Amino acid sequence: MIRAAREAALPFVSELSRRRLLSLTAATAGGVAASSLLPPSVLAAVAEPARPGGLHAIEHVVILMQENRSFDTYYGSLRGVRGFGDRSALELPNGQPVFAQPNGDKTILPFSARAAAAQANRPGSDIQYLGSLPHGWTDGQQAWAGGWNDGWIAAKSAATMAYYDRRDIPFQYELADTFTLCDAYHCSMFGPTNPNRLYLWSGNVGFEADGRRVVGNDAYDEDNHPGYTWTSYPERLERAGVSWQTYQEWDNYQDNGIEFFASFKAIARKALGGKFKSLTSFYEAVGAAEPAEREKLLAELDNGVKTLPLAERQLYRRGLRRTPPGTLASSFRADVEAGRLPKVSYLVPSAVDSEHPSASSPAASAALVYDVLDALASSPQVWARTAVFLTYDEYDGYFDHVAPPVPPRSRTEEFYEGKPLGLGFRVPMTVISPWSIGGYVSSETFDHTSVVRFLERWTGVREPNISPWRRTVSGDLLSAFDFRRPATRPALTTPAPVPAAVPRWRAQPPAVGERPRQEPGTRPSRPLPHRPTATAKVRGHELIITLRDNGARGSHFAIHRYGGDRTPPVHVDVLGTHEERLPIVGGRYRVAVHGPAGYRWWFTR
């Protein structure tokens, strides 16, 4: 059943979330930490010194992956990050900056969602409910446009260029100003939710039963999909004796990726006793049932779980168990308070809390994140030992100006239909912990496999599904932390209240646009492992470009050639020295070399 139908099947979830939002807004309006939307417990916790001990000071990792937001849509206007003021932004073949996206014989620039609401005679609060855009494999490739990143309007519509600023998503901005925001964190592929989440749950995507690469949401047909047969990372944690837990409600928006693995599907079907083919179908029936029938169905499932062999029962309770609507945060809090929090926690919100543009909102997600952080910080001993990764599975078709790194052609395992799987476009990642306080930006290249690699470093449990190229191009998120020096909490600004929900809508650009401005000022940055340089010389009819990186792990370079046809960029991964030879036609050339973290070199004659 498609997601829209499932949302209709569980209407009571929205009301529960609205009540939580009203509670949060009332607390702020009532003078509790009036200058901040963060929980008072978090404000107290960030004032405490970080626990020493380096990486091993961390005892718990909490992973909350939300839905469908691009980096520029959220943080293009935030000070001190690679946003709308990017001085090394890609130049398009027509000579325009990448921000001026072609629309026939005209261009469309990023525009304020708030201004679009005013233009449509809507209140500014309506921007919380912008609708979803195309975000599949085909239109993702179309937007990327072979590396020129100028196909957004044709692939997604003009609404793709809408963005938020600090007034619109104050909670998200305050998190970025308090902790560490990654501005080079990419989703893992040019595709929708499920394949991107598979990178988080298993480090890679494999193949469907018919031989096609997993680039779509085929697994959402849970009753008929056979399941994926490669090993998930939670299964590796289980075998290694590392505790883990998935927290989710009856409606998990089909975002719990391990439910699509054949091993977990088999366990679920055993527990269901043949009456239902999937847990999603079961909980849809539960949500639609009258109270007496609902209790009967839940009791039958409990009995089915009890009949499972011990190992399968453990996997069910850790990976598949769901709790009633509105209880994700309270279930998590109960484990924190009881000292039961596992080493690795995966939080999978319901549709209304997921931040997805078609089902949720930034405000609804803020309420959930507030509750989760408050649960941790209200137990100071747990907060002092915990790192939270707050990120997004993919970009929902909303514009991001940074063309992502993609593999060279020699990495055939990273291609499908002659096109690179990824990396995909940038999405936000906020690292929340005692060791990432201070309003920092980390500009090292990351993707969803970086979360798994952090867990590898921390637990010692390796994930062999991660490809060699991913390990080359993406880091392991350690650089987002500082385990050596105490952090200083920055000054915070007063956020706006949370608005009431309205029907979804698409923002439209103004008749005459102008390039948006980024907030003035800078922010401290985390150290980079990249040490890129590029030089060039002419020899005969060739331009010889020498790329170097003698840093800790090398750099990805993209070489863009201008003049004549739209020659695809050349992609090179360099640790040490590499030479790239380009032909010179007519005695003239114009070449831009883009490296990591906004490094750029021009060679022209």
Image (spheres, rainbow, N blue to C red):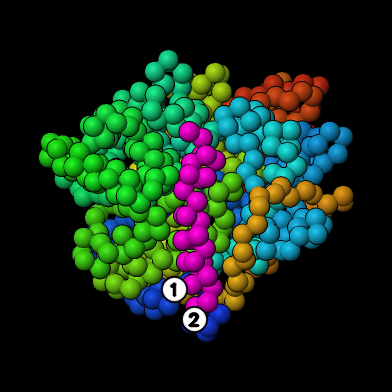
Residue 6 is labelled as: none
Q: Identity of the amino acid at label 1? A: Pro
Whether residue 136 appears in this view of the structure is yes
What's the magenta region?
A: 1-27
Q: On the picture, is 500 further left or further right than 413?
A: right
Q: Nearer the viewer, residue 469 or 515?
A: 515
Q: Which residue is mark 2?
A: 33
In screen coordinates, is 333 left or right of 193?
left
Magenta stretch contains residue 11: yes
- The numbered mark, 2 or 1, whose residue comes first in the sequence reads 2
Disc 1 designates what residue?
39
Within the image, what quadrant is residue 475 found in?
A: top left
Element under label 2?
Answer: loop
Task: Give coordinates of residue 405: x percent, y percent.
Answer: 55, 36
Residue sitting at x 68%, y 59%: 126
Task: From this view, report whether residue 242 is shown above or below residue 106.
Answer: below
Other-residue count near label 2 (Cα within 10 Å), few / some / many at <14 / 14–19 / ≥20: some
